[in-house]
Every structure is written in C-alpha cells, then in structure tokens.
Image (tube, helix red, strand yellow):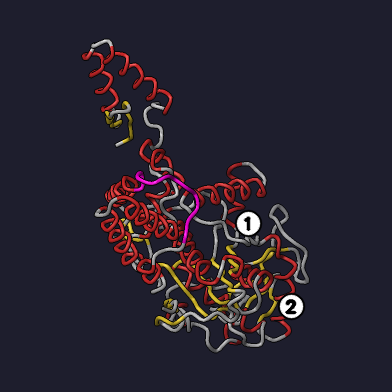
Amino acid sequence: MALTIYDSMAREKRVFEPADPNRVTMYVCGPTVYSYAHIGNARSAVAFDLLYRILRARYGADHVVYARNITDIDDKIMKAAQEAGEPIEAITKKFADIYRADMGALGVIRPGLEPTATGHVGPMIAMMEKLIEKGAAYAAEGHVLFSVDAYPDYGKLSGVDRDEMIAGARVEVAPYKKNAADFVLWKPSKDDEPGWDSPWGRGRPGWHLECSVMIESELGETIDIHGGGQDLRFPHHENEIAQSACAHHGAPLARYWMHNGFLRMGADKMSKSLGNIVLAHDLLKDWHGEVIRWALLSAHYRQPLEWTEELLKQSKKQLDRFYRLLEDIPFTEEAGDAPESVMLALEDDLNTPEAFAGLHELRDIAGQLEGEARAAAIARLRDAGRLMGFFNEDPAKWFKGAETDGLTEAVIEGLLAARADARKAKDFQKADEIRDKLSAHGIVIEDGPQGATWRRA
C-alpha cells in the first residue's frame, strides 16, 4: 500500500511521492527556547516523530533528512533573559537542552538537523537583499518588510481573506508599511538589545524569515514535507511560502504541508496566552514518557485531543496490559519489521486509532497461543509497538516504575527482605505490617515459588 498523507494545501489526502526517494526531506517548526514546552508543543513533536519513523521504515533511515529548527532569538527570549538576569545564550541553551531531554523522554528521535536562527543570520540578509532586488520587499525606517502584493497566492494555504485579516487585527499596523498586511523580515535593535550589522542598520531577523532561510540552507529550495501545529498555518507558514516563492523564482517551499490539531483543556485550546497550559516537563515527573506518548497518539493527529488526567490513567492501564504480556519473552533493544496490519494503518495518514486497534489484536492473538508460537507472536507485537515508539522499557523495570514518597527500589527491596525474614521466623503480624505499608504506597507484592516480587500499582 502507498503512504498517503493529508496535504493541508490541497485539502485532501494524497499519495506521498518524494522528489528523490534516496533523499526524503522533512522540516518541522521547532521550539522558541525561552521556557518549558507545554504538552501541546509536545503533540507536534510526537506526531511528526511518528511520521519520521514511518518514512525511515519505508525509505531507509539513511535516506530521510529531518530538520527541526530552534528559534534562539526572539522578543520573548530577550524578555526571559532580562527577567532572569542572565545572558540570552544561557537562557536558550538551558531551555534547548531541556526541550531535547523532555522530547527524548517521550520517545522522540532527535532530528538529524537542528539549525538555529542565530546560525543563519548571514543567509537571512542575503535572502532579504534578493527579495528587495526582485521588488518583493522594501526597507523602511530600519525595517525590511515583505510586500504581500508581490505574491498573488498569499492566503492560499490558510484560506484567510486579507481584508478580514486586517479587520481582525491579525497584523501589526505601522506607518512605515505600504500595505497593512506587509510583514517584518528585519527589525532594528536598540543598543541594549542583541543585533547584527546589515545594510539597513543594526537589527535582528523576523520569525517568519528564519524558517525560510534555514530550510533553504539545510534542505534546499523545495522540500518534500513541511509540518507544524495547526496554529502555524497563519501567519507563519503563509508568510514562509510567500517569501520563499518570491526568492526562488516561484518554486514551492514544500510539496506537502501537514498540520497537527489542537490540544484542548475543556472548551478551550491549550495556549500560553490563555494560561491553561500543562508542561511536558512537569508531567514527566509523575508519568512515564510512554504513557504521555500513548495519550498524545490516542486521537488522530489532525483531530482535537481532549487532555485530561483520566486520559493518562487509561493510557497507563493499556500499556500495563501490553507489558504484562511482554514479560513472557526476554527483553531486547533490537526490533524487527512491524507487522503489516499496524504498518498499513500508519501509512494511511498516520491513523493511530487503527494502529492501536492492530496492537490490541496482536496482543489478543498472542494471548491465545503457547510455546514458541506464543513467543513469536509477542515478539511481533513488540516490533509493532517499537515502530510507534512504545515497548522500549524492560517489563521488570516498567512495573517497578518511578520512585514515590521516598520509596526507592533499594528501600523496597530492603522491606521485602525484612518481610521474608519475618515470615521465616513465623512473625506473620510483622510480615503483614510490611505488606500493608508497601500497599499503602502503591506497591503490589506477588508471592511465588522463587520468592516475592513487586511492582508499582
């Protein structure tokens, strides 16, 4: 079966055909590193990580080039550095490292390329000079602005009407603009602000320009797939398309556009402006990364996802059932090809609900078998889960979970040893007291012929 993806520009599912199967290119808008990523940001990272995995499985890991940028110069970063009393470089390094660690805990494979905005200022200046020469941009009062009138297809991706956009105050109205919809490519910097020398004075780049230049520099003028959150369709991706096309003689920026849906908290989408965010960093203190990943992939990536505590509890419960079966075969970090049933679901525009159904079917089949056939079926189940970023934990470690209430693994093992000694001495009251104490902290003891084992409930 062919890989199909929903193209936001075409507004329909299309068979994916890369320009060059030996070099499949994908770019996803990454973090602006001034604070922790919220779980809505993580949904985008996880969704496109899954696509990255599918592309690698289909074309070979060495034939997929994935870039996810880091925006390390921005007004929000400058404000965060000022409030913390630290250099901007310290803030961006800190939160870039935290972002990588948090996304890694969610099973996100680090992209092969992580271009930074500050590392591409020279090429940004060169693109602006080219746009000015072509009449698609102009300088005014230390700014460089893109002229939307130079690109007739402006608004095609988002479907936003320019007059409605202006009336809805979605653009910054300024006296130096020729058209209210024109957007900033370069802005002047004050003496106490970071800046770079340019033909238009000391300044810094605009957000939209950064991605166009990083894509051209790292991947080429036209890439196969450009992804990001639904909220980026306008104005960010719309502006990227316009400036890149005008700089590259009309060549399209991307052959396929993909956008993941919003995460919702009750009736509202999750956003920092509404103050209803849940940080991935905080969630990882209480939940295993695979649980959060399962929850994020439980709905189709293009659909809204209601984020609740109950969703996390159900995700943990589902994973526990799989890990209980995985205990029956030796743990290994190696993985084979995923079964066709799961692969076909994922190649249908990342249909994760159908893929999850395939995992459950594989588990049910394995549960009905015995001997070598059972072991082989469980291994197939593990391979399917590994493709989606699951089942990477040793089952024994999975059920012991994370430390809670100061009960480390060493403390629990010590209490179990004390309980064994009490039972041996026929002091069953003390043995029961230890069991009750562990139970109160969510520790389940299972007695067997080889002694007692434990796991966290």
Question: Compared to 324, does 5 lie above or below?
Answer: below
CA gap, disc 2 and disc 1: 23 Å
The amino acid on which the numbered mark 2 sits, given as a three-letter code, is: Glu
Question: Which image quadrant is residue 158 in?
Answer: bottom left
Residue 298 spot, x, y in % from top left: 33, 60
Question: Which image quadrant is residue 361 in?
Answer: bottom left
Q: Quadrant of the C terminus?
A: top left
Look at the magenta stretch and give its main secondary structure: loop
Question: Compared to 330, does 159 lie above or below?
Answer: below
| Residue denoted by label 1 | 72
Which numbered marker is on residue 129? 2
- From the viewer's side, name the closer residue of 132 and 143: 132
Question: Compared to 371, does 4 lie above or below?
Answer: below
Residue 214 spot, x, y in % from top left: 65, 68
Residue 426 spot, x, y in % from top left: 23, 11
Q: Is residue 359 visible?
A: yes
Disc 2: CA contacts within 10 A as few (<14), some (14-19) or many (>=20): some
- From the viewer's side, name the closer residue of 370 and 78: 370
Which numbered marker is on residue 437? none
- From the viewer's side, name the closer residue of 434 and 327: 327
Of the numbered discs 2 and 1, the one sitting upstream in the chain is 1
Span highlighted in magenta in the image: 326-336
